[in-house]
Amino acid sequence: MACSPVERISVLPSLEKPLALLFVDIADSTMLYERIGNVTAAALTQRVLAHLRRLVEEHRGGVIKSLGDGLLAAFPQCDDSVRTACAMIGIQDQYGLRLRIGIHFGSVIEGVGDLYGDACNVAARVQQIARPGEILATQALADGLSPDLRGRAKPLNNVTMKGKTVPIRVHQIRTVDDADDDAIDSTTLGFSLVSEAGHRMVTLHLSYRGQDITLSRALPRVTIGREDSSGLRIASRQTSRQHAVIDFTRESFLLTDHSTNGTFIRSGGSPPVVLRRDATKLVGSGLIGFGAEALDEGQDHVVAFRGELA
């Protein structure tokens, strides 16, 4: 029986070996099931995953395991992982959905049907912070690319990761020329805005240029960005097309930044919070700057927020 390329380079399970690890999943799959129904969504998911598997195999990689609405693949060469990721992004429109992809290069230990090691955790984290339709890769992966592919890697920001004392540099892999805003060198700050003990936010009011949106259990999510399709469209060149998402989860409102320039939060007398590919809870009231510091509610990139506590 023929082995996959990854299996062919296998060594003893107890030994480490370097691989390029690719995590991919279908963005907003829960909303997909709600929109088209369980049976249709499940069938579509299986077709997409089958296509993704073929792309992995065509680029000399091996699928390690399926992960519900996504999969983990491994490649001996960094170039092949990036070519696969670009091919995956290229099939999105065939299925009317968006994929999120994260790639990292590092040492792993092979087990039965799985890989183990810190590199797996890093690749998974990078995939989680990717925007729908985006490929993110670590510095370690970018360093292993040939010159022609290295030019597709656009440096973004350093991202803090659980268990890591030093932030990890993240790059966006561009499949076509990207006219979005230039990246800014900076480090992610993972602060949380702390509410009064025992209090939970039940509604969050957003105000932007006469438009008001109220998030609650009934409306648990809003996408924010420069795209016309955004739930809250920000008419500012400083704001990315798919800048951020606010979700109602576990009785709190979580703002997740997916942007190039970052999200800046001012609340009361607290020090400003700067998010770059990170998340924080929104508590109390204040201003959010999507792409630049929030100095005044009248700025074209600034949204006012107000939370109501129970």
Image (cartoon, grey):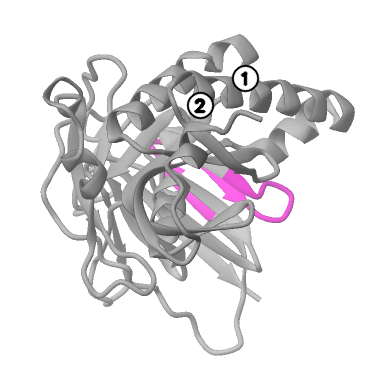
Pointer 2 residue: 56
Residue 97 visible somewhere in the drawing: no
Residue at 41 percent across and 27 percent down: it is 85
Locate the C terminus and report the quarter of the image it occupies.
bottom right
Q: Is residue 86 left or right of residue 142?
A: right
Where residue 7 appears, as percent x and y from the top left, is 51, 41
Span colored in magenta: 205-221
Residue at 53 percent across and 14 percent down: it is 91
For marks 1 and 2, the one nearer the N-term is 1
Where residue 78 appears, as percent x and y from the top left, is 29, 35
In what element is the residue under mark 2? helix
- Structural distance between the alpha carbons of marks 1 and 2: 9 Å
- Identify the disc placed on residue 5: none
Residue at 52 percent across and 24 percent down: it is 57
Vertical arrangement, residue 293 with respect to residue 38, above or below: below
Of the residues tagged 1 and 2, which is closer to the observer?
Answer: 2
Locate the N terminus and report the quarter of the image it occupies.
top right
Pointer 1 residue: 51
Residue 268 visible somewhere in the drawing: yes
Where residue 258 appears, as percent x and y from the top left, is 37, 43
Q: Quadrant of residue 298?
A: top left
Q: Quadrant of residue 165?
A: bottom left
Q: Determine if the magenta segment contains residue 119.
A: no
Vertical arrangement, residue 55 with respect to residue 202, above or below: above
In this view, the residue in front, 116 or 26, is 116
